[in-house]
Structures are given as structure tokens and as C-alpha cells.
Amino acid sequence: MPQYELMYLLGSHVADDEVPKISEQIRKFAEDLGATDIQETQLGKKKLAYPIKKTRNGHYVVVNFSMDGTKVNSFDARIRAQDTVIIRYILINLDEHFERLEKDKVVQAKLNRKIPPVEGAAPTAIAAGSPVVLEAPVKKEALAKKEKKEEAPTIDLSEDIDERIEKALSEDLTK
């Protein structure tokens, strides 16, 4: 059976003593649909990054469980029906998530190998079984040009900052 993770957010209008009741209700929904290995973690009340449904704070709860993939849609529908107390939720298949994560790591490894090595740097040890990509050596002239491009512009602070502000404010912008 695939592993799933449900994270839901209860609005601040839900009293602190009601949170365990609601989380038990969600747990019962999962058990009714045949979920096993249910692990619940209450992360507590936290401030939201932005208001959701006129709410600035919310209770975060994470539930990990295993469930048959055919019953996930009905579980999702039951959670969606709780819209008076649950203001946001996300239900993910952890197996698919980990597969995507592995694919992303492979792609990132390919991208990292395309970075040209710095001339004069000591060669690094290569792990057994890892593919090796040979690249052309980088010329010193190319590195010098690259370094010139990467230099940040300098600002002359020798002039008094107050004078510069006054000068900017006194300019006539209607010309």
C-alpha cells in the first residue's frame, strides 16, 4: 500500500480544546477507509504568512498513513467536506514524491557536472560507480574576462550623503 501524508490547517476560530476532537475525526475517516500505520503530529498554533479566509493564525496537523490508492479520492472528499474548520490541506503520495525527488537529484547531478573546473584546482576523489565527464581545460584569459564581468559596481561615498539628497530633491523634474 502506498504511503500518504496529509497536512491540514485549522482556522483560528477553532478553540484549542476542539483541535484534538477534529484530529480524531480525521483519523477516524482514515481508519474507516482502511488506513493503516497512522501517525499524527500536531505542530501547534502558528502565525500564517498571509491571511487565509480572514484568519492570521492556525493549528497545523500532519498525518502519515498507508492506504489503498483507490480509496484516496473518497478520503479527499471527506476532508473537503470539513471546510468550516479546515481552511487548507494538502494530501500527497509519499512514494511518488520520493521517486520525483530521486529523478531531480539525478538531473541536478548532471547540471552540476557541466560547471567547468577551475584551473589549478586539485582533482577531487570520484566515488566508485559514479559517471565521469571529461571537460576541456579552461584558459586563464577566459577566467580573467569572467572575473571582470562579475565585479560589482563601486559607489563613490566621498561626497556627503546629505548634499546628494538635497541635490536630488531640489532638481526640477518638470523639464
Image (tube, grey):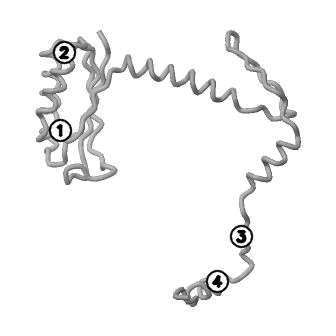
Location of residue 87 by image quarter: top left
- Count how many numbered circles sit on residues in the image: 4
- Dot 3: element: loop
Residue 35 picture location, percent across and down: 21, 14
Tell me how far mark 4 sits from mark 3, CA to CA.
Answer: 13 Å
Of badges 1 and 2, nearer the viewer stands: 2
Q: Nearer the viewer, residue 33 or 15?
A: 33
Tell me how far mark 1 sits from mark 4, CA to CA.
Answer: 54 Å
- Dot 2: element: helix
Residue 127 picture location, percent across and down: 70, 15
What residue sits 12% from the left and 38% below the top? 18
Of badges 3 and 1, nearer the viewer stands: 3
Assess whether mark 3 and mark 4 are in contact (beta carbons under 8 angstroms): no
Assess whether mark 4 and mark 2 are in contact (beta carbons under 8 angstroms): no
Residue 20 picture location, percent across and down: 16, 33
Location of residue 152 by image quarter: bottom right
Label 1 sits on what residue type?
Ile
Q: Residues within 10 Å of mark 4 (few under 14, many from 20)?
A: few
Label 2 sits on what residue type?
Lys
- The disc label shown at residue 164, or none: 4
Label 4 sits on what residue type?
Arg
Assess whether mark 2 and mark 3 are in contact (beta carbons under 8 angstroms): no
Left or right? Give the position of 64 relative to 20.
right
Q: Closer to the N terminus: mark 1 or mark 2?
A: 2
Left or right? Give the position of 51 relative to 145.
left
- The disc label shown at residue 71, or none: 2
Q: Closer to the N terminus: mark 3 or mark 1?
A: 1
Quarter of the figure with the N terminus: top left
